[in-house]
Image (cartoon, grey):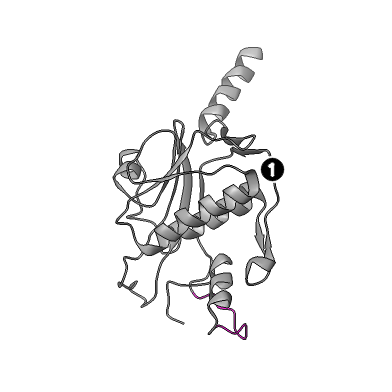
Amino acid sequence: MGARLLSALAVLAATLPVTAAPLVLVSKAASPYVVYRDPTAPASVQQAASELVRVVGLATGAKLPIVDQPRSSMICLGDNAASRAAGLATGKMAEESFVIAVRGQDLFILGPDTADGALTPGGGCSQGTLFGVYDFLERFLDVRWLMPTEIGEDIPTCAELRVDGLPIEDAPDLAYRYLPYIQNARSAARDWALHLRTGEALPD
């Protein structure tokens, strides 16, 4: 009976998804990590890098540098040569979807990103990497955007940023997600709606 039980447990273990070991990105306001994005990436990826650095800094006190060349240990944003070399690409991913994954000591956040000046087949814009960063900040730092402008930001402080339970893949259930009557002509309202991952793959 013991041998059968061990065999059954071995089969079960082989069928379970493999998750990466926890990464400690920040500890006591210090971090060995940089944020890498291709300097020619779309504006939404550049925004993702800036937002990640800003919010992590407010939450932990650590200032992560943004670099133009990949190097470990890094948080790599977007579909680029470094992410593809790590076996991650967006070619078959749905619009506005994203993946958060670990390879070695490197963290990757990427999704389909519409090139500047281009449109999705539906006539909108996909910002998967940016949505992945927003999800990362909510999931691992408990950040919430409750209303427009910085007044509505809830960014708890913490001594350590630890990442585990990866990989994570997600995509919106609805292609069109829109918040009416929030003064959408104002940039602050549009920015808040973007933080909430309202639909961008279709035109407004």
Q: Quadrant of residue 149?
A: bottom right
- Quadrant of the rendering where the N terminus is positioned: top right
The x and y percentages for residue 92 are 35, 55
The x and y percentages for residue 45 are 40, 58
User: In the image shown, does 171 or 32 lie closer to the viewer?
Assistant: 32
What residue is pinned by disc 1? 158
- Magenta stretch: helix, strand or loop mostly: loop
User: In the image shown, does 127 or 186 lie closer to the viewer?
Assistant: 186
Q: Would you say 7 lies left or right of 91 here? A: right
Residue at figure coordinates x 64%, y 34% from the top left? 28
Residue at figure coordinates x 46%, y 72% from the top left? 200
Q: Secondary structure at mark 1?
A: loop
Magenta residues?
A: 176-184
| Residue density around tag 1, few if under 14, some if 14–19, many if 20 or more, within 10 Å | some
Q: Would you say 65 lies left or right of 152 here? A: left
User: In the image shown, does 28 or 91 lie closer to the viewer?
Assistant: 28
* Residue 173 in the image: above or below residue 103: below
Kind of residue at disc 1: Cys
